[in-house]
Image (cartoon, helix red, strand yellow):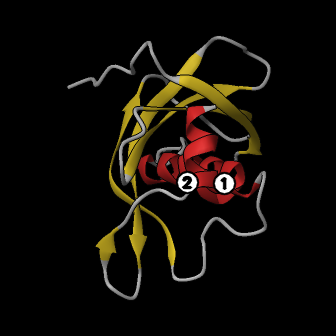
């Protein structure tokens, strides 16, 4: 089942990265689990783009679900661009969206996906309101 990305998302960050030799599986293409690492790296890079750490003391982001649509195989060597967008800020959560392209093939999407991020108080193990700085990053 292919999950479609929404049209109303707002681009926030491009994250260039290299495919590493160890990203491949025994069939010679990037292992399916590595795509989630690419999305995670883009998300953390975006969160750190305006702050030293992506959390506030004992509060921070937690992914509660994620998905990936594998559209084309990626093989080593390759330089990628993970394009990240956000949408739908709520009281405690927001949506993140990703499109993975090869750097030399702009507009050709090799994979796309998304993740729901909630803001959690780690001590209480409970969702809490998004901090103002985070809401500003999502709202624009």
Give the Cα distance between marks 2 and 1: 10 Å
Neighbour tally class for label 1: few under 14, some 14-19, many 20 plus, Cα within 10 Å: some
Residue 41, by quadrant, is: bottom right
**Residue at left offset 73%, top offset 58%:** 48
- Position above or below: 73 against 125: above
Judged from the image, the secondary structure of the residue bearing numbered disc 1 is helix
In-front residue for pair 115/88: 88
**Residue at left offset 54%, top offset 55%:** 37
Residue 126, by quadrant, is: bottom left
- Position above or below: 118 against 79: below
Neighbour tally class for label 2: few under 14, some 14-19, many 20 plus, Cα within 10 Å: some
> Where does residue 88 sit, x and y in percent of width and height?
40, 32
Looking at the image, the residue that sits furthest to the front is 132
Mark 2 lies on residue: 40
**Residue at left offset 64%, top offset 25%:** 101
> Where does residue 120 sit, x and y in percent of width and height?
40, 70
Mark 1 lies on residue: 47
Q: In which quarter of the image is the C terminus?
A: top right
> Where does residue 80 sit, x and y in percent of width and height?
71, 34
Q: Is residue 81 visible?
A: no
């Amino acid at each position: 089942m292919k999950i479609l990305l929404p049209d109303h998302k707002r681009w926030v960050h491009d994250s260039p990265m290299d495919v590493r030799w160890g990203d491949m599986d025994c069939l010679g293409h990037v292992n399916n689990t590595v795509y989630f690492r690419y999305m995670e790296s883009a998300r953390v890079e975006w969160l750190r783009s305006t702050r030293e750490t992506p959390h506030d003391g004992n509060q921070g982001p937690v992914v509660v679900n994620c998905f990936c649509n594998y559209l084309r195989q990626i093989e080593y060597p390759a330089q990628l661009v993970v394009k990240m967008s956000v949408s739908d800020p709520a009281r405690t959560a927001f949506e993140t969206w990703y499109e993975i392209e090869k750097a030399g093939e702009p507009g050709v999407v090799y994979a796309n996906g998304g993740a729901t991020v909630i803001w959690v108080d780690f001590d209480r193990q409970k969702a809490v309101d998004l901090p103002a700085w985070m809401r500003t990053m999502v709202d624009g």
